[in-house]
Image (cartoon, coloured by chain):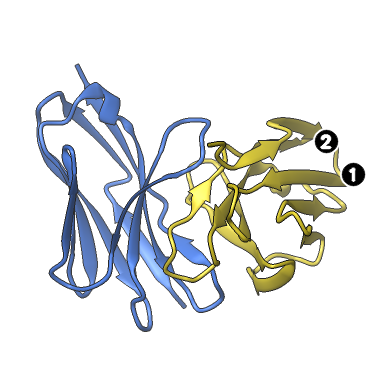
Amino acid sequence: DAGVTQSPTHLIKTRGQQVTLRCSPISGHKSVSWYQQVLGQGPQFIFQYYEKEERGRGNFPDRFSARQFPNYSSELNVNALLLGDSALYLCASSLQGATNEKLFFGSGTQLSVL
Amino acid sequence: EDQVTQSPEALRLQEGESSSLNCSYTVSGLRGLFWYRQDPGKGPEFLFTLYSAGEEKEKERLKATLTKKESFLHITAPKPEDSATYLCAVPGSARQLTFGSGTQLTVLP
């Protein structure tokens, strides 16, 4: 069975541009979460979606937005990119999105902002 | 605010040299503690969930234990393929996992 898939794997943007990252969860999983991981740090929570509804939001500015589609795939959008947005963006899926469920992570999208 | 602190930041071991990684946490009402392994260029891979003090779980050369304030990941007779970053995390109140910064383990042949 396919795991969590993310696209693109790598992306280079310049300051002020906008970016869209995509994620397909494991089949049967209804919850998708997004995390940002800066080099040398642990992942930091951005959003969680379940059944197309936002269920949780981390401490990120409004430039970050996301949505979940009827097929449970998800997109993360970041507007007005800053140099500090350079990071590995991880998508994770789980069955129901409960707080004590284990998460299955994709390999991430490496975003570089120049 | 939930906090997770891992130590050491980096650990180099000779193959076969056992050791332990530490994860201390501050959280209001523990709903579990997770251990993940992350290889370079990949997302974290789930290892264990622990729910209550005194609980232990094992997988191959890894054993995770939990007390009321910290968790340990014991690595017995490690091999080079155990080299990775090990992350611990606790669930928060906003549907998130709060991660520590990880311990980068290198096992030398």
| Tint applied to chain A in the drawing | yellow
- Residue at the location (74% across, 66% down)? A52
Which labelled disc corresponds to residue A13?
2
Label 2: state its secondary structure: strand
Q: Which residue is mark 1?
A: A17
Q: Nearer the viewer, residue A4 or A108?
A: A4
Labels 1 and 2 positioned on one and the same chain: yes
Residue B12 point in image, percent of width and height: 23, 31
Left or right: residue A85 compared with residue B70: right
Residue A91 point in image, percent of width and height: 61, 49
Please tell me whether residue A86 is drawn above or below residue A93 in the rendered image.
above
Compute the Cα span from label 1 to label 2. 7 Å
Q: Nearer the viewer, residue B80 or A31?
A: A31
Residue A16 point in image, percent of width and height: 89, 47
Label 1: state its secondary structure: loop
Left or right: residue B62 compared with residue A40: left
| Tint applied to chain B in the drawing | blue
Residue B20 point in image, percent of width and height: 16, 47
Left or right: residue A104 compared with residue A56: left
CB atoms at circles 1 and 2 under 8 Å apart?
A: yes
